[in-house]
Image: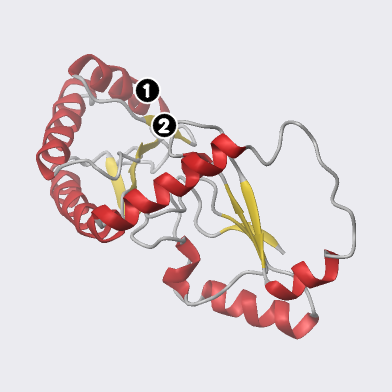
Amino acid sequence: VIGETIRSSPFLPHPEYWNIVREACDRHGALLILDEIPHAFGRTGAMFTHQHYGIVPDLLVLGKGLGGGVVPFAAVLAKDELNEAIKERAMGHFTHEKSPLGSRAALAMIQIIEREGLVEQATKKGAFALQHLQKLKAEHSWISDVRGLGLMIGVELRHPDTSKPAKELANDVMVRCLELGLNFKISMGCIVNWTPPLTVTQDQLSRATSILNQALQDCTPS
């Protein structure tokens, strides 16, 4: 069974979802493989996102943030019993893998996250951002949902009368925000994705909310 612990849009599963999947995998002898490439290493307010759900996957896929945003680096972590099963087999070696530079970057990244308490900060800053964005939702009928976990946040834009995805508005808002100094990506055509650095300040988050508010005022159909 292969899945993303949370969708990077973000879409958050029911709190019991992964416990049910884990139990089903154990019952049927299936491996649970989780992809946390977009959000591991503190972004969601836990070092690994599956920790929010109280489970342990059999295999965990990591990347992106693993190299500290400096060096392309990825890894697959496996439970001890899986490592035992393959230890007698030759894994081979290629020049593009097991990079010493990538390993050093990953180690430095983990040390900084732990030293600076960035996991705990992501929880607090994420709650701060969501609180401000919920106020924004109350002021703008085109915001259909605000959701997130830590500093992985989504603001969904839909037509207030038809509930259809407001793709044109989302694109206009993104362009206007760029003009005002705020950069983000749009997912699924209508979801504003906020994934700021873990070192973002509350003042910067407040400024980002103000820019998004201004862009919505400028771009929303009258």
Dividing the image into 4 quarters, which one contains the N terminus?
bottom right
Instruction: Give amino acid for label 1.
Output: Asn
Of residues 61 and 97, the one drawn nearer to the viewer in this rendering: 97
Nearer to the camera, 22 or 167: 22
| 180 sits to left or right of 59 | left
- Residue 66 pos. (x, y %): 50, 45
Q: Quadrant of the C terminus?
A: top left
Whether residue 149 is visible, yes or no, is no
Residue at (69, 73) in percent of width and height:
80
| Disc with the residue nearer the chain's start (1 vs 2) | 1
Regarding residue 198, the answer to whether it shows in the image is yes
Report the residue at 33% width, 26% height from top: 169
Q: Amino acid at mark 2?
A: Ile
Residue 219: quarter of image: top left
Q: Which residue is mark 1?
A: 171
Above or below: residue 140 compared with residue 6: above
- Where 22 falls versus 89 (above or below)? below
Query: In which image quadrant can residue 178 be found?
Result: top left
Q: Quadrant of residue 45?
A: bottom left
Q: Are marks 1 and 2 in contact (CB under 8 Å)?
A: yes
Please name whichever residue, 65 or 89, is drawn nearer the observer in this view of the structure: 89
Which residue position is annotated with label 2? 186
Residue at 57% over, 73% down: 56
Instruction: Please give the label number shown on residue 200.
Output: none
Q: Position of residue 212 (x, y in %)?
A: 20, 31
Query: Which residue is situated farthest in the bottom direction here?
Result: 27
Report x, y in % for residue 82: 76, 70
Callout 1: SS: helix
